[in-house]
Image: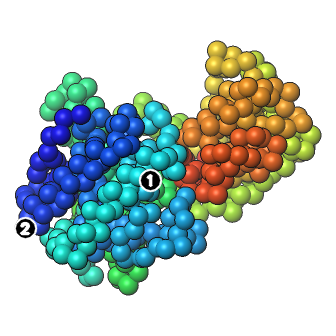
Amino acid sequence: MKKERIYIQQWLDFKPYQSQTATDSYYLKLSNEVKHVITTNTHSLVLQGYLQAQEIDMLACFLTSYFEDIISETNLWNSFIKKHKELYNKQLPFYFLEEYYEDEINLQDVSFLIWYFMNTIQEEKFIAPFNDFIIETAKKVFAIFDNAWDYAPENEHLKQFYQIDKDETDFYEARSIIDIVLFQSYLFYPDTTKKIRETEFEIIETTEAKERIQMFLNDNRDSTLHKTHTRLLSLTGKEWAADIIGDKHPLKQDILAISQRIRGFFFYKGQDDISVFIEHIASGKKFELTKKSFDQGDTLQTIDTILFMGLVQWKNEWWFSGVFFQQPFNADLILDEKNSIESRASVNFLDHQTEEVKDVLAQQYNAFLEFNGGQPIAFIPSEKIDSFIKNYIEFFNASLKLSSKEKEQAKQRAKNDGFFRTIDEPKNYKEVSETALFFFNPKSGVEIALAINSAFLLPNNPYFEEAESEDHILRLLMDESLSVGLAMYCIDNCKTNLPFFQEGVGKSYLKDIDFLLRFWKKDSYYAIPSITFTGTKED
């Protein structure tokens, strides 16, 4: 590998500002020292086998940014340490912490950060945290930081970007600090920053209507900001921003209370001096959009004009967030929206139906246990998935013991509310795997999984193959499309019988399994019930 130096623009790529400040030259020099020990120690060839030359530069800047963060008290790393300790009663996963000093640099921090960076910047190979090249490289890097500890300068300019005025009322200022944390900070550079840049590049490259590129970029960034979770602890941007500004900040709870973003089609229903009145087409819900966030009210003239826009609730007001355009009344679009499960579900969080959801899921879960011989999991030939689902639905409907009149009334409510659909065409599951499993997750509902049956050594699984077991377990743990509930069902019921969990890395994973599941399944860690309510009355 060529021993080329890191340049200032590479260093600034990890900062929420573009022009060099007084301390950047110092930390750039430190980054080059870090790069030197990374690329010249006895384990450097192993590390370079995982990372490309440019990624080695990124790693050096990333680790030096951690050191700068501690020195400058920008509170990114310490927020992670604090949150991890709240969840697991220890500062970090994996490593021994008998000698660990909060608010200072630690060898364990550097080891963890190397592990985190390497498993996030690339996803082809999972690297265990106790690899010799991680530990030995961390020792070399830590020695550089330890020598610089007493005289490294604070970056006061950097610190300003992670602060917000205690009396701030503007939603866009709160959104700005979330954007900085997710997309412009060193801590999430290999994770959410990398992902947003990849999607933005794809938009630029694939959008044919070049005049609309900026609109698509803005909408993508706003959408990602509100819904993405980080690999570290599966937290959202608003959760990280709230922790970084600190417990004593009066806006912490307001930032945590920022609502989910509603993005979709609305009817324009009028306006006054304070608000624009709109109605969500799919659900019929009405909103008052504050004019503090929307300066295009004078372009709205005709009632029931269709608007496409994004909304977010901040301090009990609805603010415009994302993109906006309008179009004339369109009957076909309206019908499509009223029949769209996705569009209707975008406002479900406003209905406060948590207990009702739990009741419905519990009812379905109990019915499934009765249907499946007391077990929440069934192992079946993949060609029988559709008939298995059909039989369960019939069994569940029969268990409700509705009269013919009640069934017809429920059906009519669904029609009136614009939700009536047929069962999807059967899929050819057999192309993926000869066998499948059907799991009822009590937190989210039905789940079908293929090519992981050998992760389950259970009496009711006739398809377990020992030779495939480790591969199936790793896929179950790491594949984000497979739920945390299913992974934990495997661990809770099979770990004592599966060799993978009895020795080696598999056994070590169990000590920090919740952290790892958050890391592997960052956007699906929190189970969401797959129920959309229909036919409900308006308040």
Compared across the picture, whether 345 is left or right of 366 comes to left
- Which is nearer the eye, 360 or 53? 53
Q: Position of residue 495 (x, y in %)?
A: 77, 47
Mark 2–mark 1 Cα distance, whole angstroms, equals 33 Å
Q: Quadrant of residue 449?
A: top right
Asked whether the viewer can see residue 211, the reply is: yes
Q: Is residue 190 left or right of residue 493?
A: left
- Label 2, on which residue? 22
Q: Nearer the viewer, residue 89 or 381?
A: 89
Q: Amino acid at mark 2?
A: Ala
* Residue 144: image location, x then y, percent: 27, 62
Indicate which label's residue lies in the foreground, 2 or 1.
1
Q: Quadrant of residue 423?
A: top right
Left or right of 141 in this view: 510: right
Residue 25, by quadrant, is: bottom left
User: Mark 2 or 1 closer to N-term?
Assistant: 2
Q: Nearer the viewer, residue 356 or 206?
A: 206
Quadrant of the drawing holding the N terminus: top left
Q: Look at the numbered disc 2 and give the secondary structure of its residue.
A: loop
Q: Position of residue 183 (x, y in %)?
A: 29, 53
Q: Give me the residue at 76% from left, 40% from top.
A: 499
Residue 444, visible in the rendered structure: no
Give the residue pinned by disc 1. Answer: 135
The residue lying at 79 percent from left, 21 percent from top is 381
- Helix, strand or loop at mark 1: helix
Q: Are marks 2 and 1 in contact (CB under 8 Å)?
A: no
Given the current orientation, which residue lies at the most extreme front position?
A: 42
Q: Residue at x 38, y 58 (%)?
A: 139
